[in-house]
């Protein structure tokens, strides 16, 4: 498991975050979209992962954004810097945050994913997410449907500690 700090995203992180976002998605969130989530959206929580170096904050390696609505966590964004993928950072971010929100009373997690995004689907399936439906034409760039996936956090063995 990588040694990482998972901390709330700050506005000062946005240059790092936007670079990852642009490298990760055909239709990246804009700075304005992140600022709206950070400043205005009262159900939003945005988290970053960085190496635990003392002193000035080191660069962001990945981030996960979510909404908390009643007892459900909805993952709205997740990306890892392309140079740092396949090192367990995505799994660590998702697992740690699902664990934290389960500790605060969340019982279910949901998200949308492109059916063509095999890496992300494998990551989610590893945490027990299952496809529960389809949102037709959800991705306006390609017209691709979104797969809706859900996980029952109360029964998620992948969240148990060693
Ligand atoms: C999806 C993403 C966040 C995964 O992050 P990551 O740090 O590279 O993933 P991890 O190293 O933690 O891998 C965890 C699991 O994800 C799956 N996975 C990750 N990369 C994979 C790849 N290239 N091929 C197949 N499976 C992969 C595997 O199940 C892996 O478990 P394993 O190592 O036991 O095989 C990353 O690929 C990314 O940022 N992609 C672009 C943005 C994106 O698609 N976000 C999701 C939107 S829904």
Image (spheres, rainbow, N blue to C red):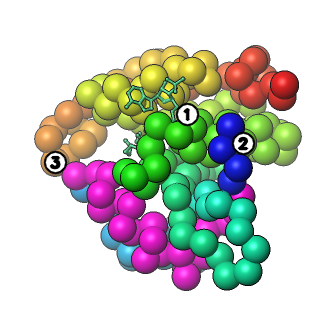
75 vs 160, nearest the viewer: 160
Label 1 and label 2: CA atoms lie apart by: 16 Å
Task: Indicate the position of residue 45 as horizontal and vertical percent values.
Answer: 63, 59
Q: Which mark is residue 87?
A: none
The reply to whether residue 28 is visible in this rendering is no
Q: Which mark is residue 96?
A: 2
| Secondary structure category for the residue under label 3 | loop
In the picture provided, is 69 more to the left or to the right than 112? right
Query: Does the magenta portion include 10?
Result: yes
How far across and down, in percent of the image, does residue 93 sit? 62, 45
**Relative to 73, does residue 28 appear above or below in the rendering?**
below
Ligand 1 location (quadrant): top left
Q: Residue at x 34, y 26 (%)?
A: 118
Who is closer to the viewer here, 107 or 15?
Answer: 15
* Mark sitting earlier along the chain (3/2): 2
| Mark 3 vs 2: CB contact within 8 A | no
Magenta range is 5-26
Q: Secondary structure at mark 2?
A: helix
Instruction: Quadrant for the N terminus, please.
Output: top right
Disc 3 under 8 Å from ligand 1? The reply is no
In three-dimensional space, the C-alpha distance between marks 1 and 3, rounded to whole angstroms, equals 22 Å
Secondary structure of the magenta portion, mostly? helix
Q: CA distance from mark 3 to mark 2?
A: 31 Å
Seen at 71% across and 68% down, the residue is 53
The x, y position of residue 111, in whole percent, is 49, 36
Where 38 sits versus 108, above or below? Answer: below
- Which residue is tagged 3? 141
Q: Is the residue marked by circle 2 packed among few (<14), some (14-19), or many (20+) residues within 10 Å? A: some
In the foreground, 22 or 43 = 22
> Residue 135 occupies which quadrant of the picture?
top left
Frontmost residue, 42 versus 81: 81
């Amino acid at each position: 498991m990588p040694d990482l700090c998972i901390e709330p995203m700050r506005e000062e992180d946005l240059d790092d975050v936007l670079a990852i976002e642009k490298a990760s998605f055909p239709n990246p969130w804009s700075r304005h979209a992140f600022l709206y989530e950070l400043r205005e959206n009262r159900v939003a929580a945005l988290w970053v992962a960085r190496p635990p170096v003392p002193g000035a904050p080191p660069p962001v390696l990945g981030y996960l954004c979510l909404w908390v609505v009643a007892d459900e966590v909805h993952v709205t964004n997740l990306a890892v810097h392309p140079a740092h993928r396949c090192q367990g950072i995505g799994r660590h971010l998702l697992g740690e945050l699902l664990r934290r929100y389960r500790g605060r009373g969340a019982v279910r997690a949901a998200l949308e994913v492109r059916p063509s995004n095999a890496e992300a689907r494998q990551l989610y399936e590893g945490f027990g997410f299952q496809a529960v439906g389809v949102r037709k034409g959800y991705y306006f760039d390609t017209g691709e449907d979104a797969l809706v996936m859900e996980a029952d956090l109360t029964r998620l063995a992948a969240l148990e500690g060693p």
